[in-house]
Image: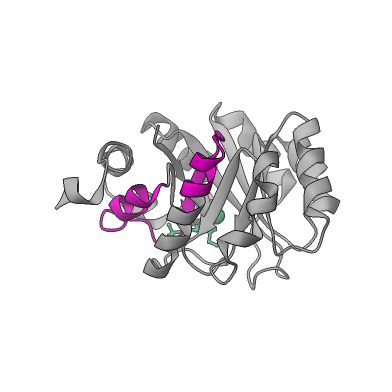
Amino acid sequence: MIKVSPSILACDFSQLGEEIKKIDSCGADMVHIDVMDGHFVPNITIGPPVIKKIRKCTNLFFDVHLMISRPDFYYERFIEAGADGLTIHIESDCNIKDTLNSIKEKGVSPALSLKPATPASAVLPYLDMVDMILVMTVEPGFGGQTFMHDMLPKISQLRQEINKRNLNINIEVDGGINRKTVGLVKDAGANVIVAGSAVFNSNNPKEEIDFFRKNTNFNDQY
Ligand code: DX5
Ligand code: ZN
């Protein structure tokens, strides 16, 4: 099943609560929350206090993407703030296995992400420990970048391996997803679609969300 997780990085932060309620009423499946520490990536966004406040605005699944160097130091605070899923980066500076297991023990859905330069093989040893793999289709740090087509084989490779092992793992894609690229990632095997600018810069966010969810593959679109 395809799920759509709009990234609030592209929303009007002066109206954060209203923006979240808007995507909720437009049928979003999750809220993608990008956390950046100015160290793992060259940008800084929001942390647990803001997440705790916006938790009151919706019951949607909070899909929290931690682009931080030490997720092992901070994951508990994000769980207390209301995260439903926590994605850590394989390139972060912590014991990946221990951190994923600790997240799971707290009843939160663990996920692992990889940057464009990291090969699929790096995350294979952790497939048994996660509910989702997040494939970055841009360099993490900023919204509004161009989709990297050379990430498509990585998505296919991961989907093949997940199927081969008979695992029930979502593949989420993040970065540069729009009407032109969404079919490509679905064809490759992604089923959770993050979209920031495509949803929040649209005059009709519901139409965008519906498009991302319904159009099954690239050939259906063109
Ligand atoms: C980038 C973030 C993305 C970003 C996607 O580091 O992880 O979630 O908001 O934005 P768009 O959809 O505009 O590429
Ligand atoms: Zn993200």
Q: Is residue 86 magenta?
A: no
In the rendering, at what x and y percent does residue 37 appear? Answer: 71, 63
**Residue at the spot 37% in from the left edge and 56% down from the top edge:** 177
102 is higher (above) or lower (below) than 94: above
169 is higher (above) or lower (below) than 41: above
Give the mark count: 0
**Residue at the spot 75% in from the left edge and 34% down from the top edge:** 104
In the rendering, at what x and y percent does residue 21 appear? Answer: 47, 34
Instruction: Write down the region rendered in magenta.
Output: 160-189
Q: Nearer the viewer, residue 10 or 161?
A: 161
Q: What is the residue that sits farthest to the front in this orientation?
A: 164
In the rendering, at what x and y percent does residue 128 appear? Answer: 68, 40
Q: What is the residue that sits farthest to the left in this orientation?
A: 222
Q: Is residue 206 left or right of residue 106?
A: left
Q: Nearer the viewer, residue 176 or 158?
A: 158
**Position of the N terminus by quadrant:** top left
In the rendering, at what x and y percent does residue 24 appear? Answer: 44, 32
Question: In this view of the protein, can residue 90 be seen by the observer?
Answer: yes
**Residue at the spot 47% in from the left edge and 47% down from the top edge:** 159
Q: Is residue 173 magenta?
A: yes
Question: In this view of the protein, can residue 7 be seen by the observer?
Answer: no
Rendering quarter of residue 168: top right
Rendering quarter of residue 197: bottom left
Rendering quarter of residue 4: top left
Q: Nearer the viewer, residue 150 or 6?
A: 150
